[in-house]
Amino acid sequence: IGPTVSHKTKIIELYLKGYEYTEIEQRTRHTGESIKRYITGFSKVVLLSNQGYSILQIRELTSSSEKVVTEYLALYESYKEIGFDRLSQITSSAVEWLDLKKGGLGVKQ
């Protein structure tokens, strides 16, 4: 049996499909706080990828596993057109994170 998609990715996908926090909480038995943390992590991965960072750099900068980063980027590719409203909404919060970390993220290798 091969590796499965992480629960984080499944939760992000529900959010991109338009489910609200309460619906996702009921379906997945995760707290709203956990869901928010996963969405924030996803938005950081997307933002860094759009800025040209490699998967390994994103993994280091976000403290996420390579598997999760890869899954998040695949999910982004699948939903970047049909989930545009939700993606715009969540990536705007990642811009604030990037501004706070500018000194650490300003130089690409």
Image (spheres, helix red, strand yellow):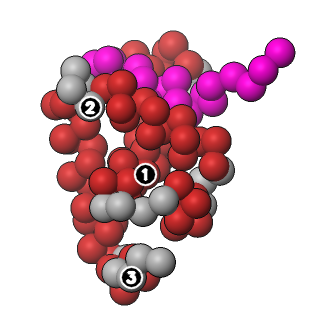
Q: Nearer the viewer, residue 60 or 77?
A: 77
Residue 100 drawn at (x, y percent):
32, 76
Q: Position of residue 34 (x, y in %)?
A: 52, 40
Would you call the spot at circle 1 few (<14 residues within 10 Å), some (14-19), or many (20 or more)?
many
Q: Residue at x 22, y 21 (%)?
A: 82
Rendered residue at 69%/22% (across/down): 4
Residue at image position (36%, 48%) is 46
The image quadrant of residue 30 is: top right
Q: Which residue is mark 1?
A: 45
Horizontally, residue 82 falls left or right of residue 19, namely left
Per the image, the residue denoted by label 2 is: 80
Farthest residue toward the right?
Answer: 1
Question: Between marks 1 and 2, how big is the CA–CA gap?
Answer: 14 Å
Task: Determine which of the numbered discs, if any, sits on residue 107 in the image.
Answer: 3
List x then y, in percent, for residue 3.
Answer: 74, 25
Q: How many marks?
A: 3
Whichever of callouts 1 and 3 sits on the residue coming sooner in the sequence is 1
In the current view of this chain or complex, which residue is farthest to the bottom? Answer: 103
Q: Nearer the viewer, residue 73 or 36?
A: 73
Q: CA distance from mark 2 to mark 3?
A: 26 Å
SS at badge 3? loop
Q: Is residue 7 magenta?
A: yes
Tell me if residue 95 can be seen: yes
Secondary element at image label 2: loop
Q: Magenta span covers which residues? A: 1-22
Is 61 part of what is drawn in magenta? no
